[in-house]
Image: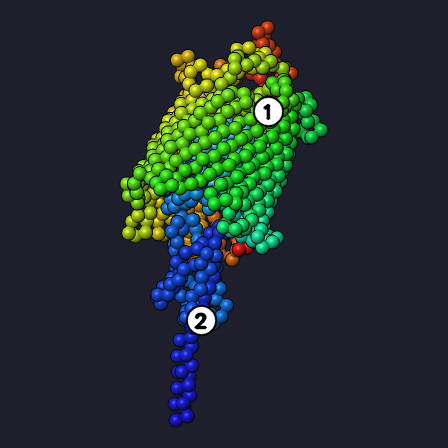
């Protein structure tokens, strides 16, 4: 009897334990942003709840033991994970990955309004930090290399400065913005994209084609809009540091503070250092520019009545970079003993948006930047100072089927340098007024009409209209037709400063007109969802852009002059671009893109392909996640067709065209430690460099000051035993990065 009692007690305790229940809770986020309305399911016991506006969830009466939890939210990849539920302390935080190919991102660049990408009448491409983490880089400038139709182009083989090409168009035709403000001036596209901490970037939006009806000058070929994180949604602290076998070291830090109940601030720091003199192509010149750069970014967000917006941000950057003869030291700066190109850059930026306290939605936005550059290209001194201020007021109103946006803007530009081309400082004003109306014709069709009028203090009146039509055949099929114009008010000397030696006279053949373009493109999106969970997204765009008044530079007619004139003809950029995204339920994901280009300048009836313009671009990103090993594999790359390259004369032995070439990378990321990610891999797997199949890249590297070059009476270089090809020192023969295969290793930490 006594034994029976003990058996009953033990059985009762076991039954009680088996029935013991508890509570689990936690947060759901993605890239530091809390996710609301996410569905939380405990499989097997059919428990379900949703996250609140702060991303928090709580489930009661959960049996103790092993459980399987599933978290889903539109626009994110579904997460399924096993958890161990204990008697207490059941707090779990989950990270969702942005499902980029779902096409449900909210965008603002196409229409200056926050709208889902699929509902925007203007095609906008969106790239989140998840995309750029697949191939970590030290700057956003480099990160853009894996975006279809976008190519960072180096323009100098020594100082490694460059610009961003969109669909084959040169950098000055691309407008770069931060949080919608034109913060990056034409003098410093590269410097504006360098030093922005990657950890502070929420997403990057790209519009291909003219957008001048909303953004004004420079938005001729397209725009890149860098959206920074809202301080309220940012993590408390984030750090990302990596280095390569070249000993390039990059550090990103992000910290969030709440100084008051109504203010949140986000502080970011970026530091980059590369100080290794490497000469693997054996020309006694550095393969890669040495650089030390520091950038500090601070953004504030203020809580106001009725959720009105008020944000303000500032950034300061300093960079010291040099390239040249491997023996160069700072004591040789500006002299003719040892050749070097040394560039000191100081840059400051201020941007902000303030919603006025009225019932109507009135938004005041502003930006300003100052850029000071002190450069020495051998003995050539280039000291430039540029200031740009921008102010804009917009009114947003919905009336029935009409969604209006109207605004006024003004832009002030100041530029001065020490070259003979700029005899006195230039100051220009560019006030403008714009309006657009999105008209919903039916649930399936939408029309956008827009126009902008600007008055330039030098060129006078400029008018830019815009038209867009969107047809939604069904939830998975969308067509868009866009047409519009663009313009660019040119500062001649912000793109050609490296060519100005001070010995040439600048000749402007006539009063130059602003460059203008007219564009049309047809966009098609198709989503395919399979019953097994596989998703395929296809986006194809056919585009056509015709430029008039394009300004060309003539260095050949007279060796003692630089002659500027509008093209006597026109230029065309046309082609077709396709992106295909594929998601498999097994964890395999692929993003593949290709662009076919046809760019040409037509002058006096003669068609000529521009320099450094490819006919084909291909990009890809393949990712595979192995949940059981907490491991993510990323394989990324690009492929470029041959480009026409700038030779010095008919005897120049370098190849007139670049070869087909590809830069490929592989990365492994371990995410098994809480709040940490350890990553590493190999860049440039194929070990490609431009030196391959060329006798040299930099001509006359042995005589960079042209001391031994002889000329005839007309100023033409003579062929001599010391100069068998009749060349001068030249660094413009460059089309790709000059770094060989190299490894990298990094560590990320995020505290939510």
Q: Is residue 461 or residue 213 the one in the foreground? A: 461
Residue 497: where, in percent of width, then height?
58, 23
Which corner quadrant holds the N terminus? bottom left
To which quarter of the image does residue 697 belong? top right
Residue 684: where, in percent of width, then height?
48, 37
Q: Circle 1 — which element?
A: strand
Q: Residue at x 58, y 35 (%)?
A: 368
* Structural crowding at the residue carrying mark 1, measured as other residues with C-alpha within 10 Å and reported as few (<14), some (14–19) or many (≥20): some
* Structural crowding at the residue carrying mark 2, measured as other residues with C-alpha within 10 Å and reported as few (<14), some (14–19) or many (≥20): some
Residue topped by disc 2 = 22
Residue 221: where, in percent of width, then height?
44, 29
Q: Residue at x 39, y 55 (%)?
A: 72
Residue topped by disc 1 = 427
To which quarter of the image does residue 252 belong? top right
Q: Is residue 632 or residue 91 the one in the foreground? A: 91
N-term mark: 2 or 1 = 2
Query: In this view, which residue lies farthest toward the top?
Result: 713
Q: Reply above or below: 102 against 522.
A: below
Q: Residue at x 59, y 41 (%)?
A: 314
């Amino acid at each position: 009897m006594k034994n029976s009692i003990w058996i009953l007690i033990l059985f009762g305790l076991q039954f009680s334990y088996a029935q013991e229940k508890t509570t689990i809770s936690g947060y759901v986020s993605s890239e530091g942003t809390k996710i609301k309305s996410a569905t939380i399911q405990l499989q097997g016991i059919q428990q379900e709840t949703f996250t609140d506006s702060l991303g928090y969830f709580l489930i009661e009466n959960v049996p103790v033991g092993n459980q399987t939890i599933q978290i889903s939210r539109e626009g994110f990849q579904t997460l399924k994970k096993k958890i161990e539920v204990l008697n207490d302390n059941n707090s779990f935080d989950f990270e969702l990955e942005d499902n980029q190919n779902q096409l449900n991102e909210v965008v603002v660049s196409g229409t200056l309004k926050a709208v889902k990408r699929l509902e925007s009448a203007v095609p906008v491409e969106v790239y989140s930090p998840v995309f750029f983490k697949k191939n970590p880089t030290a700057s956003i400038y480099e990160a853009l290399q894996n975006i279809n139709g976008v190519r960072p182009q180096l323009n100098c083989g020594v100082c490694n400065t460059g610009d961003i090409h969109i669909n084959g168009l040169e950098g000055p035709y691309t407008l770069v913005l931060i949080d919608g403000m034109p913060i990056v001036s034409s003098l410093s596209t590269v410097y504006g994209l360098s030093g922005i901490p990657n950890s502070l970037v929420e997403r990057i939006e790209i519009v291909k084609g003219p957008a001048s009806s909303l953004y004004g000058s420079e938005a001729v070929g397209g725009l890149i809009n860098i959206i920074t994180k809202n301080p309220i949604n940012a993590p408390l602290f984030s750090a990302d540091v990596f280095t390569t076998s070249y000993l390039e070291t990059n550090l990103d830090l992000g910290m969030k503070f709440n100084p008051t109940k109504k203010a949140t601030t986000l502080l970011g720091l970026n530091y980059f250092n590369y100080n290794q003199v490497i000469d693997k192509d054996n020309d006694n010149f550095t393969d890669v520019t040495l650089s030390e750069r520091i950038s500090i970014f601070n953004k504030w967000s203020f809580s106001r009545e009725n959720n009105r917006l008020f944000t303000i941000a500032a950034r300061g950057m300093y960079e010291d970079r040099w390239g040249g003869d491997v023996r160069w030291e700072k004591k040789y700066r500006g002299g003719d003993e040892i050749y070097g190109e040394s560039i000191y850059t100081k840059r400051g930026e201020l941007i902000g948006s303030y919603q006025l306290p009225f019932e109507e939605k009135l938004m005041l936005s502003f930006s300003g930047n100052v850029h000071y550059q002190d450069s020495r290209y051998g003995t050539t001194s280039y000291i430039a100072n540029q200031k740009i201020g921008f102010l804009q007021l917009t009114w947003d109103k919905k009336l029935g089927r009409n969604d209006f946006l109207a605004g006024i803007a003004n832009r002030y530009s100041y530029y001065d340098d020490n070259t003979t081309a700029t005899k006195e400082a230039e100051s220009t004003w560019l006030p403008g007024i714009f309006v657009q109306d999105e008209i919903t014709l039916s649930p399936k069709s939408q029309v956008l009409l827009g126009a902008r009028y600007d008055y330039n203090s030098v060129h006078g009146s400029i008018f830019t209209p815009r038209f867009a039509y969107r047809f939604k055949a069904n939830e998975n099929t969308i067509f868009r037709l866009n047409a519009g114009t663009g313009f660019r008010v040119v500062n001649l000397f912000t793109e050609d400063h490296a060519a100005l030696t001070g010995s040439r006279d600048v000749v402007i053949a006539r009063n130059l007109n602003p460059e203008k373009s007219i564009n049309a493109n047809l966009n098609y999106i198709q989503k395919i969802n399979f019953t097994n969970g596989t998703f395929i997204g296809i986006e194809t765009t056919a585009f056509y852009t015709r430029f008039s008044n394009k300004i060309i530079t003539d260095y050949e007619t007279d060796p003692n002059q630089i002659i500027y004139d509008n093209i006597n003809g026109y230029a065309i950029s046309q082609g077709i671009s396709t992106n295909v995204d594929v998601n498999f339920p097994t964890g395999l994901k692929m993003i593949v893109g290709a662009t076919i280009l046809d760019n040409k300048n037509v002058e006096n009836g003669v068609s000529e392909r521009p320099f450094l313009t490819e006919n084909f671009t291909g990009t890809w990103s393949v990712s595979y996640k192995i949940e059981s090993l907490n491991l993510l594999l990323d394989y990324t790359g690009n492929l470029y067709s041959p480009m026409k390259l700038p030779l010095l004369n008919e005897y120049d032995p370098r190849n007139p065209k670049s070869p087909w070439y590809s830069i490929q990378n592989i990365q492994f990321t371990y995410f098994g430690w809480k709040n940490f990610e350890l990553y590493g891999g190999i860049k440039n797997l194929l070990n490609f460099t431009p030196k391959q199949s060329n006798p040299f890249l930099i001509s006359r590297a042995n005589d960079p000051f042209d001391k031994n070059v002889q000329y005839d009476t007309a100023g033409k270089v003579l062929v001599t035993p010391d100069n068998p090809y009749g060349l001068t020192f030249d660094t413009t023969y460059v089309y790709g990065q000059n770094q060989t295969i190299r490894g990298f290793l990094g560590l990320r930490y995020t505290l939510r």
